[in-house]
């Protein structure tokens, strides 16, 4: 992983074998980033993502292995319970151009990932909503 910080942006390059969420959190900790908007493109070989069922208030995750293009990955970095809280959604395409996506749980890079964080000059915390079943922004 390599990073470059400029004013309100943190740009990150990931290399083969690196796990995206772990790397993103490490870069945020090193640069003291607590609130940001995240955008990513790149290539991955292992992805775990899920879909939230509002009726049962549960995530159902699925693992994918293969050759994937990350066509879009965006989300936020906020805080919850004193730690960083990444909330990321991914869309990715396989070799047959079949596109899938959902809430990102894990992503291992196969070639590279280009990450741009827009650092927000504020703190946004999260709080669990028992009614909805999700960790919502707490202003």
Image (cartoon, rainbow, N blue to C red):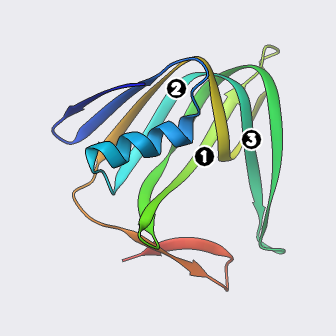
Q: Residues within 10 Å of mark 1 (few under 14, many from 20)?
A: many
Between the C-alphas of marks 3 and 2, the distance is 16 Å
Mark 1 lies on a secondary structure that is: strand
Report the label total: 3
Q: Earlier in the sequence, mark 3 or mark 2?
A: 2
Which residue shows up at 43% across the image and 31% down it? 115
Q: CA distance from mark 2 to mark 1?
A: 12 Å
Q: Outermost residue, bottom direction?
A: 131
Q: Determine which residue is flagged by label 2.
A: 41
The image quadrant where one finds the C terminus is bottom left
- Mark with earlier residue (2, 1): 2
Q: Which residue is mark 1?
A: 89
Against 44, is 72 above or below? below
Q: Residues within 10 Å of mark 3 (few under 14, many from 20)?
A: some
**Quarter of image, res 45:** top right
Which residue is at a point 63% across and 72% down the rendered structure image?
A: 134
- Asked whether 29 or 113 is in front, the reply is 29
Q: Please give left or right for residue 94 compared with residue 70 in the image.
A: right
Q: Which residue is mark 3?
A: 48
How far apart, in angstroms, are the residues tagged by discs 1 and 3? 11 Å
Rendered residue at 81%/26% (across/down): 65
Asked if marks 3 and 2 touch (Cβ < 8 Å), the reply is no
Q: Nearer the viewer, mark 1 or mark 3?
A: 3
Q: Is residue 67 above or below residue 19?
A: above
Q: Secondary structure at mark 3?
A: strand
């Amino acid at each position: 992983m390599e990073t470059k910080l400029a004013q309100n942006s943190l740009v990150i390059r990931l290399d083969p074998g690196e796990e995206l969420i772990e790397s993103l959190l490490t870069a945020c900790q090193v640069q003291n980033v607590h609130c940001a908007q995240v955008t990513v493109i790149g290539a991955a070989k292992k992805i775990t993502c899920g879909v939230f069922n509002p009726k049962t208030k549960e995530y159902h995750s699925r693992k994918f292995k293969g050759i994937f293009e990350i066509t879009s990955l965006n989300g936020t970095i906020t805080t919850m319970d004193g730690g960083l809280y990444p909330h990321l959604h991914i869309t990715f395409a396989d070799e047959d151009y079949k596109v899938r996506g959902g809430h990102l749980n894990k992503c291992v890079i196969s070639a590279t990932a280009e990450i741009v964080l827009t650092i927000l000059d504020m703190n946004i915390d999260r709080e669990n909503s028992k009614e909805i079943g999700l960790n919502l922004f707490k202003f």
